[in-house]
Amino acid sequence: MGVGIEVQQLNAWFGKNQALHDVSMKVTPNQATAVIGPSGCGKSTFVRCLNRMHETLPETRVEGKVKIGDQEIYGTGTSAVQIRRRIGMVFQKPNPFPTMSIYDNVAAGLKLNGFRDRQKLNEIVERSLRHAALWDEVKDDLKKKSGASLSGGQQQRLCIARALAVEPQVMLMDEPASALDPISTGKIEELIFQLKEHYTIVIVTHNMQQAARVAEYTGFFLLGKLIEFDKTEKIFTTPSDKRTEDYITGRFG
Amino acid sequence: MRNKGTALHSAEMMIPRVGGFRRVKDHLATFLAVGAVILVLTPLVAIFVYLLYKGVGSLNWAFLTQTPKPVGEAGGGMANAIVGSTLILLIASAMGVPVGIGAGIYLAEYGQGRFGKAIRFTADVLNGVPSIVIGIVAYSIVVLRQKHFSALAGGVALAIMMVPTIARTTEEMLLLVPQSVREAAQGLGISRWRTTISITLRTATSGIITGVMLAFARVAGETAPLLFTAFGNQFWNFNLNQPTAALPLQIFVYAISPFDEWHRQAWAGALILIILIVSSVAALRVVSSRGMMKGAS
C-alpha cells in the first residue's frame, strides 16, 4: 500500500543557487499528485528531494522536513540508500542498464541487494512486468535480449517494472512520458491509473493535459516556490492565484 | 500518371545537380582515407609476412618443446622461454590489472579533487617513462633485496608498466557510462560501491578489456625491463624466485650473437611471440564477448 508524504519548509540548493524556497505540501496516499510549472522552476529538484537523490549531485544541499509515512527521511541516522528502496523513481529518459538482459534489469534492485531466492525472483519479475504492462511483449526473450534493445516506450515501461520490483510505497515519476510518442504516452498514463491502487504517485509533467488526466492533486511551481497546491480540478478551472491562471491559460511559460 | 510525372520532375528540380568539382573532392577525400588505412596496415602486414618467411623454417616441434642447445649443436628450442614469458606475464597481469582497474575506478568515481588530479598526472608521466628505467626500479626494489634475478622481479617491472595504461583507459571507459545509468541504480536503493562494481563497471566491461589487452600486448614484447630483472635462463625453471627465460630476452640474445643457427631461431622466436600475443588477445575477446547481451551498446 502507498503511504502519504508530508513536506515542510523544504529548501534546496545547487551550490549558491537556491532551487527551492520553503516548499510545503501534503501528498495523499494512493493517489497521483502532479507537479507542473515552466522549465527550471524546481519541479525535478523537488521530486529528487523526496528520495534523497538531490544530494547525489555535487555541491548540493537540502534543508527542511520530508516525512514518508512515519519516517522522517532527512532525520539523523536514516540512510539515503534505505530510503530509496521505499521510494521508486522513474526518470525522464528511459535508462535501462544497457548490458543487462530484460530479466536482469527488473531483478537488479533485488539481486544487487542480496536477494537470492530464484523462484521468488522469477515470480517478482513476472509480476512487475505484468504491472508495467510489458510482460506480453517481452516474455519470450526475457533473458535473451538486452534492455537497451527495446523501443523507447518499452524501455520506459521496463524502467517502471524495475522500480516496481523492489516494492516501493511511493513512485516518483520525473516527466516519464516526455520522450515518448503519443501511443506509448497513453500506455504510461493508463499504467499510472492502475498503479494508484498500490502506490502513491508523484509525477512531474510539462504536459498540462496529462496532469489533468492522471492526477487528483496538482501543485504549480514557479521560480522554486510552490505557488498553488489544490485538487487538480480546482487548479485547472478556478485557480486562486493569478500566476497559476496565467500559466495554465498559456500566457507564459 | 501525369501527376506522378510532374511530382518527380519538381523533386528533381529541388535537388541541385552535383557539380564536377564537388564530385572530384568527394573522390579525393575517399581516396585519401583509404590511402591512410593502407599506409597504417602495410607495416603490420609486412612485418608479419617477413616474420613468417624468416621464422617458419626454424619452427618445429623441438623448437616448442626443447631448451636451447649449446653453440655448435643443432636443434634445441625456446620452450623454456615460452613458458617463462607466460609465467612473467601472468605475474604482471595478476598484479597490474587489479591495481590498474582499481585506480581507474577511483579516478572516475571519486577522483574529482586535487588528489585525483595528482594521480592522473602521475599516471601520464609513468606512461612516458622509458621501460629501461622501470627495469632499474624493479631491479632496485626486488632484485637487490632478494639478491638474485627472478621471474617475480620481471613481473613487477611489467606490472608497473601496465598500471598507468589500464588505469587511464578504465577511467575513460567508466566516464563514458551515462550518469543516468548510475542514477537509475541509486534510485533503486543500490549503494554506491555496489552500483560501481555491478552496474557501472559491468556496463564499461568491453572498453576496459580493450585497455587491458593493449597494456598486455605492449608489455608482452618488452625486453629492456627484463634484462636485469628476469635476466634470462638457458634451462627450465619453474621457480618464481630464480632467473627465468623470456621470449623477448632470448630473441635479443640470439639476434646479437654471431651464430647463423641462433639468428634463425631468433626469427622463429619473434614469430612465436607475435602469435602468442595475437592469440591471447583474441582469446580474451572471445571469452569476454560471451557474457555480453545482444543489442547492448
Image (cartoon, coloured by chain):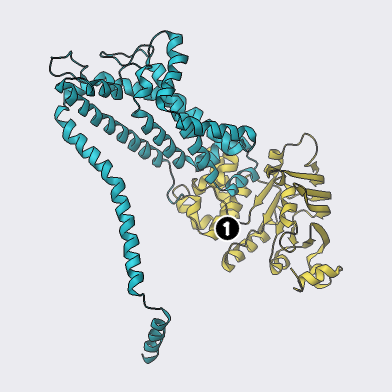
Chain colours: A yellow, B cyan
The residue at the far bottom in this view is B2
Residue drawn at (80%, 42%), measured in percent from left and top?
A72
Q: Nearer the viewer, residue A57 or B169?
A: B169
Residue drawn at (64%, 53%), measured in percent from left and top?
A90
> In the rendered image, which residue does mark 1 sit on?
A133
How many neighbours does mark 1 have within 10 angstroms: few (below 14), some (14-19), or many (20 or more)? some
Q: Nearer the viewer, residue A51 or B250?
A: B250
Q: Position of residue B45 (x, y in %)?
A: 25, 42
Q: Position of residue B274 (x, y in %)?
A: 28, 33
Q: Position of residue B104 (x, y in %)?
A: 53, 35
Residue drawn at (51%, 32%), measured in percent from left and top?
B123
The residue at the far top in this view is B147
Q: Nearer the viewer, residue B108 or B158?
A: B158
Displayed quadrant of residue B226: top left
Displayed quadrant of residue A91: bottom right
Which image quadrant: the C terminus of chain A? bottom right
> Would you place residue A31 above or below residue B202 in this image?
below
Relative placement, left or right, of B61 versus A91 is: left
Relative placement, left or right, of A172 versus B267 is: right
Q: Chain of mark 1?
A: A
Relative placement, left or right, of B22 versus A141 is: left
The mark tally for this picture is 1
Residue type, numbered disc 1: Ala
Report if residue A180 is visible in the image. Answer: yes
